[in-house]
Image (cartoon, rainbow, N blue to C red):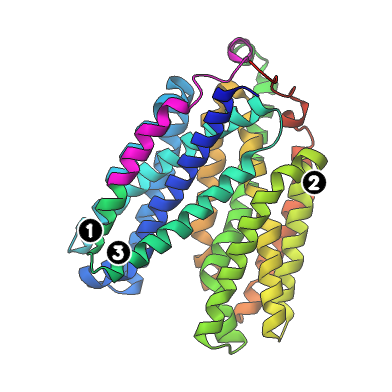
């Protein structure tokens, strides 16, 4: 394994951690910003839609730019832009200005998200084995770092704008310093990608439609899986508190349990995918998640609910990385555009999850609303055969030495 490839992998870890830290920094400052702007929870919910809209638009733009200019150009550029944009939500004192700030920050975050995932696909292919899940675990670690830093800055009496500006400045430095380690091109495949692009351009229409159709199936699966993740983010603690009567201090650990097992699962998923294949990770992971949320739905005991949320997080942990990886490998010449489609629709699911469950609670009890999540997990497990062809496992391992 040559040193440049190892350095590229480390740099990818850094960018995933940076993206998670920047988004986490915004999240931990939400209460203070909401109070300063003097808006209700309902108004904030509407403004967060603009954050999601900006991210979706950014993903579509960055996907095509990454394919055209290369990840080595787009990833650090979007890392700098996202770091600079982080300070914007900390400045407004009225809802309209905050709306514009969130739209811009969401756009920049979406650009960074897709471009770093496209680069991760190239690193994974060069390694010749799955490494995508570990990158996504690092994103989660970035969120933890943001929480710790946010607590420290709040204790020091810094305003949200000052704390976010400090983190943004550090982010600019990190994005620029890490840029040199990114891959110039996918090692040993530049010619292959050129040939593939030419073949795709002149391929019969049914073949092009087949590839496009596969990408959209992956995107729909990402939407379903990430809808489940979004529902857990917002409703896990409320489930323990409102349905099982747990005190708020205990209920808070429901999301912590879910997030912890998801991070652990992503650290383990690459080894399992290398041994059993990405289809097995998606199928068995979705099935396990379905069992976990079923336990949450029917159990009257707090300890069983914790176990259910833990299994739900563990099962979902490897699903999204497999879908992103499959999208990127479907056509290396269009990795960025394909990842942007899957990530974009998945992000819609992440945002829609809390709202969909909320709407269902007008009709049924909260735990009964989770039946929808069971059904989505079941459909994902059944449809996992879309990953039967695993390009990563068929790639020759990267040569040792240099």
The residue positioned 79% from the left and 53% from the top of the image is 284
Is 250 within the magenta? no
* Mark closer to the chain start, 3 or 2: 3
Q: Quadrant of residue 82?
A: top left
Q: Nearer the viewer, mark 2 or mark 1?
A: 1
The quarter in which the N terminus is drawn is top right
- The reply, left or right, for residue 146 in relation to residue 282 is left
Q: Give the image location of residue 160, x and y in percent.
A: 25, 62
Query: Which residue sits furthest right?
Result: 276
Is residue 213 visible to us here? yes
Instruction: Name the residue nearer the viewer: 134 or 54.
Output: 134
Give the alpha-carbon distance from disc 3 to disc 1, as whole Å. 11 Å
The span shown in magenta is 169-198
Q: Give the image location of residue 143, x and y in percent.
A: 46, 57
- The reply, left or right, for residue 103 in relation to residue 75 is left
The residue positioned 57% from the left and 20% from the top of the image is 186
Q: Which residue is mark 2?
A: 280
Q: Which mark is residue 279?
A: none
* Mark closer to the chain start, 2 or 1: 1
Q: Is residue 306 above or below residue 220?
A: below
The quarter in which the C terminus is drawn is top right
Dominant SS type (magenta): helix
Q: Which mark is residue 153?
A: 3
Give the alpha-carbon distance from disc 2 to disc 1, as whole Å. 45 Å
Q: Quadrant of residue 331?
A: top right
Q: Are marks 3 and 1 in contact (CB under 8 Å)?
A: no
Q: Are marks 3 and 2 in contact (CB under 8 Å)?
A: no
The residue positioned 30% from the left and 48% from the top of the image is 168
Q: Nearer the viewer, mark 3 or mark 1?
A: 3
Query: What kind of element bears circle 3?
Result: helix
Instruction: Name the residue nearer the viewer: 79 or 300.
Output: 79
């Amino acid at each position: 394994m040559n040193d440049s490839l190892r350095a590229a992998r480390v740099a990818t870890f850094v960018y995933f951690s940076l993206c998670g830290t920047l988004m986490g920094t915004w999240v931990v400052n939400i209460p203070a910003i909401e109070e300063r702007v003097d808006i209700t929870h309902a108004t904030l919910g509407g403004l967060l839609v603009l954050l999601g809209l900006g991210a979706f638009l950014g993903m579509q733009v960055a996907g095509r730019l990454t394919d055209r200019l290369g990840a080595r150009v787009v990833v650090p550029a979007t890392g700098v832009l996202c770091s600079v944009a982080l300070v914007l939500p900390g400045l407004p004192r009225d809802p309209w200005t905050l709306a514009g700030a969130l739209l811009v920050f969401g756009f920049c975050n979406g650009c960074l998200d897709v471009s770093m995932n496209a680069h991760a696909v190239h690193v994974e292919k060069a390694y010749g084995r799955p490494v995508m899940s570990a990158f996504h675990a690092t994103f989660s670690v970035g969120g933890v770092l943001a929480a710790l830093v946010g607590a420290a800055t709040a204790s020091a009496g810094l305003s949200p704008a000052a704390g976010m500006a400090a983190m943004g400045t550090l982010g600019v430095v990190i994005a620029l310093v890490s840029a040199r380690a990114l891959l110039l091109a996918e090692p040993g495949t530049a010619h292959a990608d050129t040939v593939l692009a030419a073949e795709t351009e002149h391929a019969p229409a049914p073949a092009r439609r087949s590839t496009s159709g596969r990408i959209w199936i992956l995107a729909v699966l990402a939407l379903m899986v990430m809808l489940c993740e979004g529902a857990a983010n917002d409703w896990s603690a409320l489930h323990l508190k409102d349905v099982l009567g747990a005190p708020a201090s205990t209920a808070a650990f429901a999301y912590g349990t879910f997030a912890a097992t998801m991070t652990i699962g992503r650290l383990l998923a690459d080894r399992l995918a290398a041994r059993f294949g990405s289809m097995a990770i998606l199928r068995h992971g979705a099935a396990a998640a379905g069992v976990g949320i079923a336990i949450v739905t029917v159990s009257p005991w707090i300890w069983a609910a914790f176990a259910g949320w833990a299994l739900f997080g563990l099962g979902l942990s490897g699903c999204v990385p497999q879908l992103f990886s499959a999208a990127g490998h479907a056509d290396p010449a269009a990795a960025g555009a394909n990842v942007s489609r899957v990530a974009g629709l998945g992000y819609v699911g992440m945002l829609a999850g809390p709202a969909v469950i909320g709407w269902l609670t007008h009709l049924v009890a909260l735990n009964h609303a989770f039946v929808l999540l069971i059904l989505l997990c079941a459909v994902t497990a059944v449809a996992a055969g879309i990953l039967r062809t695993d390009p990563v496992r068929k790639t020759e391992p990267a040569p040792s030495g240099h």
